[in-house]
Amino acid sequence: MNQPAKARVLFVDDEPRVLTTMRILFRGQYEMFFAESGQAALELLKSQAVDVIVSDQRMPGMTGIELLRAARELNANAMRILLTGYSDLNAIIGSINEGEIFRFVNKPWSNEDLTTTLQRAVSAARASRAAAARAGGQTQQTPPAAEQIAGVLVLDDDPQVPSKIQSVLGSDYRVFGARSMEEAVGVLEREQIGVVVSDTRVQDHPIINLIGTLKQHHPELVSVILTERADAGSAIELINQGQIYRFVTKPILDSQCKIAVTSAVRQHQRLTQNPELTQRYEVERTPPPPPSSPAAGLSERVKSLRSWVKRWV
Amino acid sequence: MKIRQILLVLLAAVAIGVLAFLLFKTQSVDTNLHQLRLANIRAVDNLDVDYNRNVMQVRTTSLGDTTDDRGELTRRIGDALNEIDQGPAALHGLDPELDQALATFLDTIQDKFELSFDFEARGTLLTQRLINSLDSIPVHADATLAAVSGSAEVRERLGDLLRQIKAEAITFALTPTPVNQPVLAERLTELDGIAEQQSSAFREAAQRLRAGVDEVLGDKTELMNKLNNFLGRPTGPQLQAVEQAYLNWHERQVAVANQYRLWLVAYAAILLLGLGWLGIRLSRSYRELDQANAGLQHANETLEAQVATRTQDLSQALDHLRASQAQLIQSEKMASLGQMVAGVAHEINTPLGYARSNAEIVRSSLADFRALCDAQTRALTLMVGDSASDEEVAQALSQAQALGESLNAEELGADLDNLLADTDHGLQQISELVGGLKDFSRVDRSRTDLFNVNDGLDSALKICNNQLKHGIEVVRSYGQLPQIECSPSQLNQVFLNLLTNAAQAIDSSGKIFVHTAPENDGVAIRIMDTGSGMPEDVRERIFEPFFTTKPVGKGTGLGLSIVFRIIEDHGGRIQVRSALGKGSEFVIHLPLKQQGSSNVAPATEPPPPEAAVAAA
């Protein structure tokens, strides 16, 4: 073991047998902590700084999302992973928006996938801890001037949505509309875009491939999903493969939408200033899109955007 | 309405009364009576004249001849007067003036009758005496002539004079003229002149003649006076006055009647106007009625078609409703099924998760053990074999030992034992859950069965276990229950529904009491929670279909209505009591046997659920 110190991982599950399994599975790899309830986990977090928290969703007393939200306030740098036995849409949206979680892991899990996910989480945690240490106290930054604010790309079938979002955000933000993925990539090539606001499907094609590819190659891009067709499966996919930043359901509530997009813009600024942090938002490999999908041709163009991103950064 | 009708009737009665009054007033002048009265008056007048004439005739004829006629006349006059005075057409009492005239007339005619009787009585006597006197005159004259002395001239003159006296006396007795008496007196004086120159005999004779003449004169004059007195009674003018007075009265009556007639005409005109107005109104109403009637007729004609269309629409709507109801009930089942599956999936996924993970760990550890085993086997083989050098053996041994140490084989073995035990436990849990599902749904059991309600409650509790986890304690107190005849899957659905509702009513922590007890001819099940309870208005409506307190889209509001129907179909009862903030209690009473039929749920329209599900 070359590493100076083992990463610290906290497992939370009301079923002690799951904890036993984890202990044996990751024995020797991490310094592990175990808690059988959310309250016990929070008590533990107060005294121990951990890198990764893996929590079950359904637990008596405190759900996994409630725990992760509280944990985020106690220790913002810890990566959060939710282990869930079934998909409750509200729980998932809540965990995305409030828990800013790194991954969903479905029960029953595969040891290999869990190991990989945990490794990624650990390295992301290390990177962000390093970045935080480097930045010192100056994480809080003055808001940049208007021309420095990155553009917002709105990808939606409904042509009303971009203007609606422009009016919600006010004139400080530049909002670009796109009604197809072609158009979206065109805009990304021409303009400085920091935030992508998109529906889950555009012209009957799921957006996940585009978002995943963008995140893979341009991790500093921040995605906000704005949809009325929310379902648990696609939300899990979007977080695991696209690291979406926020999940907003239609109808658009002005305040909710404004908060989501403005914080996404700030997130983008943080990421461009601290590229190490992008590891926190590393995504799973997107399965190669089927050739018929328009995303297939697009993914090459997206990759070529790297040069532009470098220049812009 | 009633008052209005009464008013109308009163109005009509008053109108008719006024009309009758006016008519009566107009009819008060009776023409027949008037004619009768006038005729009566005329009759009296005529009779009076007849009577006068009758009396007059006495002069020329003997009284006795006319006596019968006069009696007849007198009777008739009496009758006529009675008619006037007292009969139905009497004039008496009509008018004071008329009364006075009538009284005067009656008095006069009374006088007249008396005079007539007097005349009759006296007249007979006088006439007789007159006739006697008249008869004596020629005798006295002859005696006078016989007693005369003198010349023939005197004799002749006396004879002439005596003839003149006789003639004059007879004339006077029969039809006296104004000149008769003076002429007679002159002749008698002339006779006296002659007698002065004659003898006393002559004078005596002349005197007797003169006395006879005087007697004739006196009787005749008395008779005449009496007749004249009778005739002089003014019955005619008085009767005229009566008639005049009556006519005056009649005229006044006619004038009054005319006045009333005018009123009547005016009133009739008013009535006619009213009638005309009513007529116009009636005709207008009639026209409206006619139109309405036409509309009705038209409606009538089209009614059948409309009814047919409506019926069709309605039956379509009914079909549609039935379809949507079935769909709703189905979607309710699907929703609760989904919720239940989600819960059970989580229940299963946790043991499945660690069991699978453990199996992987064991498999990968097995490789390590195999390597250790191989190393140890090789060292053992080298040790036992002759060909290997000591160094080689020592190396192999140390390798095996190092491997064993790195593996920490003892600890690993214990861990693996643990993992396998956990896996066993997990698999056991899964199989229990699956068994519970099966028990719960009863898919392998007949619809009507003998069933222990306690078992149903247990399986429902197992199924909704994941919903009960959050600090909810379930307290079971089961009584010794007889098996009841029922549809177990439906009852399980009821229990699951009630338990789920109870769990949802509990905010963070609380208790659910599940109590069963045998009853007369049945069982009682009480499910009580310490949750939020519900207000009275909610409690009253919870069994209504589509009533829900959950947000739109979160519940169909059918769960408890299905519960209610299942219990009703089983011939049981369900009651609910609730106190806001303290909790709710559902009490179910179920009979031991189903009534009459082996089919438990005939009234359940959609087929009973294959897998009973709880309501959200």
Image (cartoon, coloured by chain):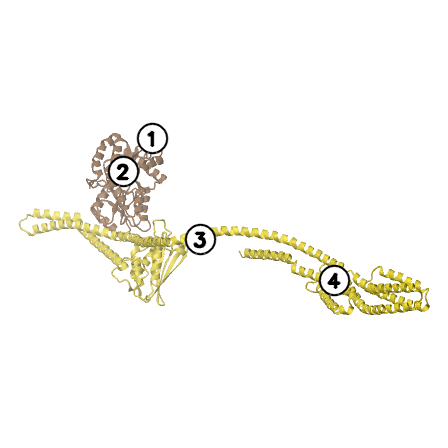
Q: Nearer the viewer, residue B45 or B169?
A: B169
Question: How many callouts does the rendering have?
Answer: 4
Q: In the rendering, which numbered label is found on residue B49?
A: 4
Q: Quadrant of the N terminus of chain A?
A: top left
Which residue in the protein does label 1 denote?
A146
Q: Secondary structure at mark 1?
A: helix
Q: Does residue B453 lie above or below B422 as drawn?
A: below
Q: Are marks 4 and 2 in contact (CB under 8 Å)?
A: no
List x then y, in percent, for residue B147. Answer: 92, 68
Chain letter, brown: A
Q: Secondary structure at mark 4?
A: helix
Q: CA distance from mark 4 to mark 2?
A: 166 Å
Colour of the chain lettered B: yellow
For residue B34, side relative to residue B272 (left or right): right
Q: Residues within 10 Å of mark 3 (few under 14, many from 20)?
A: some
Q: Amino acid at mark 1?
A: Ala
Chain for disc number 3: B
Q: Amino acid at mark 2?
A: Ser
- Label located before the other in sequence (3 or 4): 4
Q: In the rendering, which numbered label is found on residue A128?
A: 2
Q: CA distance from mark 1 to mark 4?
A: 152 Å
Chain for disc number 4: B
Q: Does residue B478 lie above or below A16 as drawn?
A: below
Q: Residue B513 occupies which quadrant of the picture?
A: bottom left
Which residue in the protein does label 3 denote?
B293
| Mark 2 or 3, closer to the camera | 3
For residue B387, side relative to residue A235 (left or right): left
| Mark 1 or 2, closer to the camera | 1
Q: Are marks 4 and 2 on the same chain?
A: no
